[in-house]
Image (cartoon, rainbow, N blue to C red):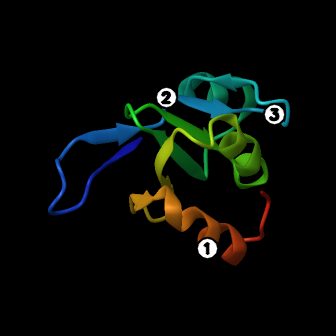
């Protein structure tokens, strides 16, 4: 599960490395989150080093708060458009503010 950066940016694959599985912030590899808990992410936060943390919509605030100063981008699984983290506030307000 990943996306390429858009035109004009350095091309690289960004993906989800862990998925939040509960409100306590416990996270597993995506394959384990799905097979053991039936959880697939709706949103993925990308850290400055390319590492990605996914979450269901109901747990996205938990994921965001894990490293708010280290996230540089995010994308939703629905559209896979890589967005700068600065757009997350507008996204959050549009999609039910959880932060």
Q: Which residue is identified by label 1?
A: 90
Question: Tag 1, which secondary structure?
Answer: helix
Q: Which residue is identified by label 2?
A: 17
Can you give x and y, in whole percent of width and height, for residue 43 in the image?
58, 52
Q: Residue at the right extreme?
A: 23
14 left or right of 76? left
Question: Tag 2, which secondary structure?
Answer: loop
Residue at horizontal 77 percent and vertical 67 percent from the top: 97
Q: Which residue is identified by label 3?
A: 22
Q: What whole-number distance in Å separates the C-alpha atoms at marks 1 and 3?
A: 24 Å
48 left or right of 69? left
Can you give x and y, in whole percent of width and height, for residue 17 in the image?
49, 28
61 left or right of 10? right
Q: Earlier in the sequence, mark 3 or mark 2?
A: 2
58 left or right of 4? right
The answer to which of 72 and 98 lies nearer the viewer is 72
Badge 2: how crowded within 10 Å, few (<14), some, or many (20+)?
some
């Amino acid at each position: 599960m990943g996306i390429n950066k858009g035109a004009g940016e350095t091309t690289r694959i960004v993906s989800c490395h862990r998925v939040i599985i509960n409100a306590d912030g416990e996270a597993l590899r995506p394959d384990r989150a799905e097979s053991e808990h039936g959880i697939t992410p709706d949103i993925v936060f990308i850290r400055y080093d390319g590492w990605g943390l996914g979450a269901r919509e109901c747990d996205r605030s938990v994921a965001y708060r894990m490293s708010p100063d280290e996230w540089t981008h995010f994308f939703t699984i629905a559209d896979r458009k890589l967005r700068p983290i600065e757009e997350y506030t507008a996204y959050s307000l549009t999609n039910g503010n959880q932060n």
